[in-house]
Image: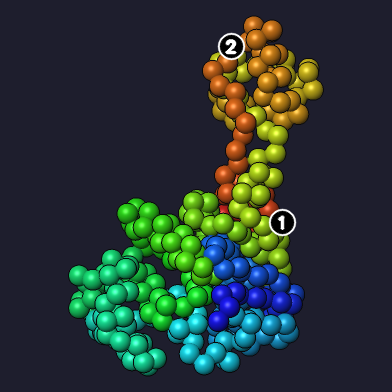
Amino acid sequence: MQATIEVQGLRKQFGQTVAVDDLSFTVQPGQVTGFVGPNGAGKSTTMRMLLGLDAPDAGSALIGGRPYAALRHPLTEVGALLDAAAVHPSRRGRDHLLWLAHSHGLSAGRVDEVLESVGLASAGRRRAGGYSLGMRQRLGIAAALLGDPPVLLLDEPVNGLDPEGIRWIRGFLRALAREGRAVLVSSHLMSELEDSADHLVVIGRGRLIADTSVAGLLAAASGDRVALRTSARTEAMALLAREGGTVAANGQESLTVTGLPAERIVSLLGAGGVPFSEVSAHRATLEEAYMELTRDAVEFQSAAVNGEDAR
């Protein structure tokens, strides 16, 4: 099976609300693709259509070139984590996986393999009702991996993980992609995607906003900005503005300068006798780049902040 996820002209409407509107993107094998957007952007609806849980009004959502309903052995072709709480609390973690495995002719040995791979080998015989949220996330990831599928769809896999678990999932996702799998990860934690994703699909109000590499997006968002630290903020602002720079104050001793390269700024400050302790090219964070992209697509905004949560 070809390890790809293909969305083409996808549309879904609920009553008067258009949840997904002519959405197209492809998730390639061998990379982690982050799937992000503000509340109500259509991420969950898109993932449900990919998994055959909702029927599209138009367009297609394909796994390896076929709709989910046409997959003969779905567990071995696509693994999915949509809701980590979707486990009966009285069922032991290992028994939950055994039930899934037996439904697809998979062995008990495979169950033990995936429990080991997600760090739950010692907790497999405990009842799921006693699991923490992070443990339930790990169990959900184990279920997604049971059939060793070439395609993975994970919705908020970092939720509930402790710092050690977050470090683990970063490396785990990258390792899965290195094996040639297509990995689609929905998340609202931009910092986690910055460390684990190769590509980013950004949607807002059901439509595509960006389909780009993480590196390309960060480079574009960083632009030609230069970060400057100086104890003589007022003098530095006046001098650089006279020379054609656009200067913004970020803190008591912190400035951002656009329109002047770092080398020119150093030369001007030195010639003007203005002290400074740091001049460096500004590197935007993924969160900054995301907030700029989705500024006009946020459904609910506070007066103070242009958007809050990417879920």
Number of other residues with Cα within 10 Å of mark 2, as a class: few under 14, some 14 to 19, many 20 or more: some
Residue 130 appears in which quarter of the rendering?
bottom left
Compared across the picture, whether 59 is left or right of 97 comes to right
**Is residue 41 in view?**
yes
Residue at 50% across, 82% down: 77
Query: Is 265 situated above or below 272?
Result: below
Measuring 67% from the left and 85% from the top, which residue is drawn there? 56
In the rendered view, does 4 fall on the left or right side of 89? right
Q: Earlier in the sequence, mark 1 or mark 2?
A: 2
* Residue 83 locus on image (x, y percent): 43, 76
Task: Pick the residue in front: 185 or 275.
Answer: 185
| Image position of 271 with respect to 5: above or below | above
Amino acid under disc 1: Asp
Identify the residue shown where x is 71% and y is 65%: 208
Image position of 244 (left or right of 147)? right
Query: Which residue shows up at 57% across the image and 87% down it?
Result: 68
Is disc 2 placed on a helix, strand or loop? loop
Residue 15 visible in the shown view: no
State the SS at label 1.
Answer: loop
Please say if 251 is above or below 195: above
Circle number at residue 296? 1
**Mark-to-mark CA distance, 1 and 2:** 39 Å
Look at mark 2 in the image and give the residue it sits on: 275
Q: Position of residue 261 (x, y in %)?
A: 71, 26
